[in-house]
Amino acid sequence: MTEEQTEPDLDDLERRMDGAVTAFRHELQSLRTGRASASIVEPVHVEAYGTEMPINQLGTVNVPEPRMITIAVWDRGNIQKVDKAIRNAGLGLNPVVDGTLIRIPIPELTEERRKELVKVAHQYAEQARIAVRNVRRAGMDDLKRLERDGHISQDDHKLFADEVQAMTDRHVQTINDMLQSKEKDILTV
């Protein structure tokens, strides 16, 4: 909030909490569940044309089968670079080059690897919940300041604080629901 603000900006708090949830959703999408998804290779960047580029800027990423990702690389000169980037990304994937097409079979997940992925998902969820609570704390601090400076009454402070808490609870519940869904996804593939 700015110094001259005389009312709490609840829309800004909502937007910032939504941002934490969106970031969490993106992190969950990058976790491999044993099913093919184009988002698995999203974080991989390839050294091409003198810069780091995401794979989707070097070729078309498709999922033709539940356990296969294909990348149709547009420039033959980048095929080996894309292959090497995927191998070195630490995703546990072994691409197969077939002309200008790279096929990436998605291996079956072991029980141990599934449990590791669930732990990672829980870590991501906790980080997202912390981010939401940090936004809540900033909002509550602003409410205290506004009351102290005489811009809002004690009753208004209480009403706004209840609204901020309800907003926080909603976002934390969304994070928990997303985590539960992803955990089920990982363990039942």
Image: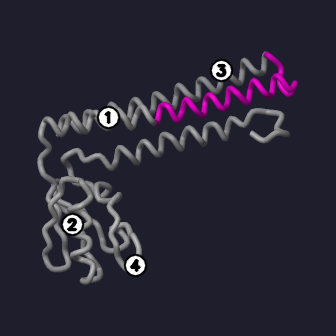
Q: Earlier in the sequence, mark 3 or mark 4?
A: 4
Indicate the secondary structure of the residue bearing disc 4: loop
Numbered label attached to residue 70: 2
| Residue at which label 3 appears | 162
Chief secondary structure of the magenta portion: helix
Q: Amino acid at mark 2?
A: Thr
**Would you say 97 lies left or right of 117 here?**
left
Q: Are marks 4 and 2 in contact (CB under 8 Å)?
A: no
Disc nearest the viewer among 4 and 2 = 4
Q: Amino acid at mark 4?
A: Gly
Crowd tier of the residue under label 2, counting other residues whose Cα lies within 10 Å: few below 14, some 14–19, many 20 or above: many
| Residue at which label 4 appears | 50
114 drawn magenta: no
**Would you say 100 lies left or right of 135 here?**
left
Q: State the image coordinates of residue 91 (x, y, percent, origin top left).
A: 23, 53
Indicate the secondary structure of the residue bearing disc 2: strand
Crowd tier of the residue under label 3, counting other residues whose Cα lies within 10 Å: few below 14, some 14–19, many 20 or above: few
Q: Are marks 3 and 1 in contact (CB under 8 Å)?
A: no
User: Which residue range is magenta in the image?
Assistant: 128-154
Q: Earlier in the sequence, mark 2 or mark 1?
A: 2
Query: Which quadrant of the rendered structure holds the C terminus?
Result: top left
Q: Earlier in the sequence, mark 3 or mark 2?
A: 2
| Residue at which label 1 appears | 181
